[in-house]
Image (cartoon, rainbow, N blue to C red):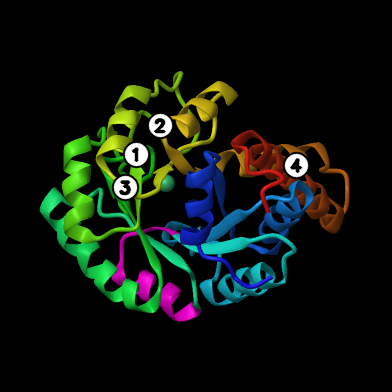
């Protein structure tokens, strides 16, 4: 298949009311697990990597691998750059041929977030590349000093003004989710999500999707989320498989981990309602 863009995939998801999973990858096993899971489920999928993962994923190795395998897949696959704070990382993804990028200005003050997000949209748009931005802040990620982000809910009216001012194509919203493993029960504000949905006319993205209940996912998709980022659940599945297979050879351990990731990804695609939509 031709390479798809996140914009194309999310437009269909939004029209038909299902969600599409986004999965970060750092190596061949993760890329293959995602694409095979999508092919098995006959589902569209978005794969990519993030700035903080580049210490694990050598960009010059993983980016061509993702793009090539996305083109060869039997289902629509889009390649996206997740959380990036440096303009340089975004330019690398644009040059490599990614269909979309995320600039995360949620750690900056609001005016800087608006200004830099807008500048990135102005560069990306003429190249046909979609830009995801974040307003409010989904907590749980750590900055370069190791300090963990606190959570700030997205304000619906601020979101409307933000999209108008920046021209961003997708908006990551903060409605109570947290990146990584939940330390206490997540409390989602679906009412707030519905208000954001009414206020802005771009696909909405849910970060911190690992650890939510099936019911939570269904509610957020019904409430207007089109893309769901999942990472922790997938690497936890791989870790459990590795621990269970520690008497095997290295290559068999890798295979077990990959199978476990493939199962975890396929389960999410089914849950999000994208299975059978390829
Ligand atoms: Zn995120």
| 61 shown above or below 39 | below
| 233 shown above or below 258 | above
**Percent coordinates x, y for residue 121 in the rendering:** 28, 67
The chief SS type of the magenta part is helix
**Percent coordinates x, y for residue 82 in the rendering:** 44, 57
Whether residue 137 can be seen here: yes
Whether residue 230 can be seen here: no
Instruction: Kindly indicate whether the residue at mark 3 contacts the one at mark 2 (C-beta within 8 angstroms).
Output: no
Q: Residue 201 carries which label?
A: 3
Find out whether residue 16 is within the magenta segment.
no
Q: Which of marks 4 and 2 is nearer the N terminus?
A: 2
Q: Earlier in the sequence, mark 2 or mark 1?
A: 1
- Which is closer to the viewer, label 2 or label 3? 3
- Which is closer to the viewer, label 3 or label 4? 3
**Percent coordinates x, y for residue 10 in the rendering:** 49, 52
Location of mark 1 (residue):
138
Q: Which of marks 1 and 4 is nearer the N terminus?
A: 1
Give the camera-side residue of 98 and 105.
Answer: 98
| Mark 3 nearby-residue class (10 Å; few <14, some 14–19, many ≥20) | some
Q: Which structural element holds mark 4?
A: helix
Please report the bounds of the magenta region as a residue range: 82-96
Corner quadrant of residue 78:
bottom right
Give the camera-side residue of 41 and 258.
Answer: 41
Image quarter in which the C terminus is found? bottom right
Q: In this view, does 229 lie to the left or right of 145?
A: right
Location of mark 2 (residue):
177
Q: Earlier in the sequence, mark 2 or mark 3?
A: 2
**Percent coordinates x, y for residue 232 in the rendering:** 56, 41
Instruction: Kindly indicate whether the residue at mark 4 contacts the one at mark 3 (C-beta within 8 angstroms).
Output: no
Q: Distance between the residues labelled 2 and 3?
A: 22 Å
Location of mark 4 (residue):
263
């Amino acid at each position: 298949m031709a390479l798809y863009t996140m914009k194309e995939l999310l437009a269909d998801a939004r029209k038909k009311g299902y969600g599409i999973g986004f999965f970060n990858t750092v190596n061949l096993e993760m890329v293959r697990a995602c694409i095979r899971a999508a092919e098995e489920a006959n589902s569209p999928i978005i794969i990519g990597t993030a700035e903080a993962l580049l210490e694990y994923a050598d960009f010059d190795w993983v980016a061509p691998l993702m793009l090539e395998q996305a083109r060869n897949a039997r289902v629509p696959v889009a390649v996206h750059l997740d959380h990036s704070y440096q303009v340089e990382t975004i330019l690398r993804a644009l040059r490599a041929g990614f269909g979309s990028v995320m600039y995360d200005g949620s750690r900056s003050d609001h005016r800087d977030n608006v200004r830099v997000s807008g500048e990135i949209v102005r560069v990306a748009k003429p190249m046909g590349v979609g830009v995801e931005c974040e307003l409010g802040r989904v907590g749980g990620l750590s900055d370069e000093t190791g300090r963990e982000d606190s959570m700030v809910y997205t304000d619906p009216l601020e979101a409307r003004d933000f999209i108008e001012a920046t021209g961003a194509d997708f908006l990551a919203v903060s409605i109570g989710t947290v990146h990584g493993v939940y330390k206490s029960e997540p409390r989602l504000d679906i009412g707030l999500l519905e208000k954001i949905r009414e206020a802005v006319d771009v696909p909405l993205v849910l970060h911190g999707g690992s650890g939510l209940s099936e019911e939570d996912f269904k509610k957020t998709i019904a409430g207007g989320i089109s893309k769901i980022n999942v990472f922790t659940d997938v690497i936890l599945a791989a870790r459990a498989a590795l621990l269970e297979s520690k008497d095997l050879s290295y290559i068999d351990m890798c295979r077990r981990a990959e199978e476990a990731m493939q199962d975890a990804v396929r389960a999410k695609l089914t849950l999000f309602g994208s299975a059978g939509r390829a």
